[in-house]
Image: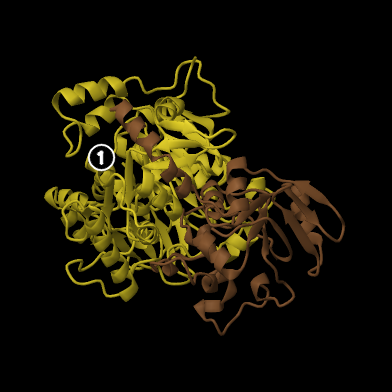
Chain colours: A brown, B yellow
Amino acid sequence: MKVLTTIQSRFVPVNIENIDTDQIIPARFLKATTKEGFGKNLFRDWRYENDDESKKIAHFPLNMSQFDGEILVAGKNFGCGSSREHAAWSILDYGFRVVVSSFFADIFRNNALNNGVLPVQVSDAFLQRIFLQDNNTELTVDLEKQTITINSTGEQEYFDINSYKKTCLLNGYDDIDYLLSIKEDIKQFETQRA
Amino acid sequence: MSKTLFEKIWEKHIVKTIDDGPSVLYIDKHFIHEVTSPQAFTGLNKRGIKVFRPQQVVATADHNVPTLNQHLPIKEELSRKQVEALIQNCAEHGIELYGLGHPFQGIVHVIGPELGITQPGMTIVCGDSHTSTHGAFGAIAFGIGTSEVEMVFASQCLLQSKPRLMRINVDGTLNKGVVSKDIVLYILSKITASGATGYAVEFAGSAIRSLSMEARMTICNMSIEMGGRCGLITPDEITFNYIKGRKFAPQGADWDKKLAEWKELYSDANAIFDKEYYFKAEDIQPMITYGTNPGMGIGVTENIPTTETINENDRSGLSKSLAYMGLQPGSPIKGQKIDYVFIGSCTNSRIEDLRMVASFVKGKKKAANVEVWIVPGSKQVEAQAIQEGIDKIFEEAGFMLRQPGCSACLGMNEDKIPAGKYCISTSNRNFEGRQGAGARTLLASPLTAAATAITGVVTDVRELLN
């Protein structure tokens, strides 16, 4: 997994609430057997009219040249619905490393963390402050300090993350490495309960 | 100390807990399917390791399979390759596969319970959010991502933080024409599509206890639609009678031992929940959704909300939702013309659902403007329906009985609803494009869907019941 420490970047605002994983990546694109290449279909049906790549929907932020960066900012309850990890893969593959929202669905949060994408949960008020910034504004997400800052105004908020997951992201470790390292404990657990 | 049902099961499955971090949770059963497993197998192969406990893994093909002509090769190349990858991966790792053509094949959340694999007190995972279905047996069952599928393959464990606990009580007697799907759509309309995020949800109360196992599964199935990590119901005599005698149910002395353990699985009288809701069964009428998340539901005789009348959670999304759905705020949903009727999915494709529909439509004919797809949840459900003559009733009504699979629930396989068309569906999600790009989904019970199939417009089933 890719290490994540500090991200300083402009952001892409998708100011919509309850964005479900079917919008992030529609089911018809889940037929691959690898993790790569999902970025081009991120938010597919919001990006293109009638599934036609030549017909970009001009007002969707991913199609607006003034928006760019490694940070996606979205309305509350981001990533609800299906457990498809393809949603996290498509966000990463598109080039985002951080998703900011005021609320995340559980499974998406785990899937993101397992792929080196950091979900940053902020207050509703702070989220609205970000949406009010112009498109040149940069945000700084500092995982070590667990802070997110609007660089132009200096406004800052602290965010929560499980300390185990934080260590994993800062070092690029994944859960499987850890679980494989405690195989003997697991076998012992199996024997005891039998 | 008093404990909840969830805590009793959780504590028995903790291998160890990381300081200031998650717990290592042991997983009893792991279901897999073709869509969310291939990258996990690739991960294992890259590490050069095998599945740790293959005998605790059960596989089926459901998401990507056609529901007509299953004896022929899958036409769509990518779907076929995904199903072939599952066959190869299961063979390589020694995993039991109930694939296409097998008499046990079906939707993963239908076959687990019907084979007696799903049992009280277990921890169960699958790379599918509707794994919450299995919680109806008093199990901790939840959906996971593909990285987590790989973790369970590698170690039979997951790193998990304990969720908060919620209990939703529904007491009283259900009105005529109201079934378990209406209960869960009603709860969703009250607590919203994110109302249970971060919680394990126990469903309790006399109205829940009165339900059959299949009806309970419909409720737990949709606990994820509230954002719930999982949903559970205390196992009781109805649960035990359902399991007894099934293919993989415990037998003989083992049954007696298991039964004694299962009878200890309930929330103690003084157990504490972080949040608790109380609803009255009498307040529930046949429900239908009008919007683009499952919390956007109303009673079938009610009007679509306006920005003034809608709950705060859905206010900002209402106009976007209604524009997508082609519906007007403040107008009635009853009488809305429908193009497709889909009765199926892991929510409502079991034999009781098919019986309910058959007994209602017997002697009636579908409306000329609708196409009706009935998709059984498994080969066993299909066989049972044919044995009971239910297939004949459907044929006479003009309904098409297809073959088992996820079908039109998710717009992935061949079964899609065309753009702009209205589909009343017994599935679980009405998201934009869920049943196909541009498709418009109205979620409802099998009974409401059947009544709508007969009239061709959204119908209050109570008007057609004697």
Front-most of residues B229 and B312: B229
Percent coordinates x, y for residue B449 in the rendering? 37, 53
Nearer to us in this view, B11 or B233: B11
Q: Report the side of B190 relative to B141 (left or right).
A: right
What residue lies at 24% left-to-right and 44% top-to-bottom?
Answer: B55
Name the residue at the bottom extreme: A54
Quarter of image, res B209: top left
Position of A80 relative to B270 (above/below): below
Percent across and percent down for residue B123 are: 37, 36
Classify B19 as above or below B334: above
Q: Residue at x 32, y 64 (%)?
A: B64
Mark 1 falls on what kind of element? loop
Amino acid identity at mark 1: Ile
Left or right, residue B126 beside residue A52: left
* Residue B179 visible in the picture: no
Q: Quadrant of residue B40?
A: bottom left
Q: Chain of mark 1?
A: B
- Mark 1 sits on what residue? B117
Q: How many marks?
A: 1
Q: Where in the figure is residue B248, as x and y percent of width and height?
A: 19, 38
